[in-house]
Image (tube, rainbow, N blue to C red):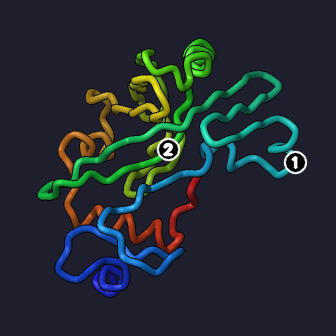
Amino acid sequence: MLNRLKNMFFNKGKNTGYKCAECGEYHDNWPALVYNAPVYYSQLSAEDKERIASLDRDFCVIEHSDQIDRFIRVVLFQKVVASCEDLHYGLWVSLSEKSFLDYKAHYDVEDYEACYFGWISNDLEGGSDTLSIPVDVMYKGGSNRPEVIPHGDYSHPFVEEYYNGISIEEAQKRVINVLKGCNSKA
């Protein structure tokens, strides 16, 4: 089954690339595995999304009666063994109020750098129960999204894969699952 899907999405004879569902053309790079919202936002009812939450391209806030959850959009680069290309994730992390406000105040400031502590807030493709993996959020200023680095001492298969890399076949499998819509994107 995987070989049939691989032939459907990937150029023959190439380890990377995919056929875009939008334009039908082949692209040389893997697409980013993008999550449109933190899973906690996606779990809200339509009424609660209107009433207690706000979401835009880079920020999400959920105002529960007993707490406020704050999230920012970030990137994670997964090393792929025997490939010169990484697999990119566009995901969300939760931050403390202090870190969230600092990042928001310096959003798009070219010469500002900061490191924040956060928690992964998506169920990532290829991972099992990746919610709440602790990460460092590295903001290097400007319009680029911050990069997240999982804490190396946290025992989790996804963290081990982050540091050791994944196979080309596993990267392709993750891309195929997202392209086919097997991922909730949240």
Q: Residue at x 44, y 56 (%)?
A: 33
- What number is the disc on residue 91? 2
Locate residue 107 relative to residue 4 in the image: left or right: right
Give the image location of residue 111, x and y in percent: 43, 16
Splitting the image into 4 quarters, where does residue 164 fall?
A: top left
Nearer the observer: mark 1 or 2; the answer is 2
Q: Secondary structure at mark 1?
A: helix
Vertical placement of residue 155 versus 117, above or below? below
Inspect the image, locate mark 2, and give the three-letter code of the amino acid beneath it. Leu
Give the image location of residue 19, x and y in percent: 39, 77
Q: Residue at x 44, y 44 (%)?
A: 130
Q: How many marks?
A: 2
Q: In terms of depth relative to the viewer, which is nearer, 53 or 86?
A: 86
Vertical placement of residue 185 versus 158, above or below? below
Name the image quarter holding the N terminus: bottom left
Give the image location of residue 89, x and y in percent: 41, 49
Report if the CB atoms under discs 1 and 2 are less than 8 Å apart: no
Q: Residues within 10 Å of mark 2 (few under 14, many from 20)?
A: many
Q: Residue at x 34, y 32 (%)?
A: 149
Q: Which residue is mark 1?
A: 47
Q: Secondary structure at mark 2?
A: strand
Splitting the image into 4 quarters, where does residue 172 fall?
A: bottom left
- Give the mark nearer the N terminus: 1 vs 2: 1
Q: Residue at x 70, y 49 (%)?
A: 43
How far separated are the C-alphas under marks 1 and 2?
Answer: 24 Å
Q: Residues within 10 Å of mark 1 (few under 14, many from 20)?
A: few
- What number is the disc on residue 29? none
Inspect the image, locate mark 1, and give the three-letter code of the amino acid beneath it. Glu
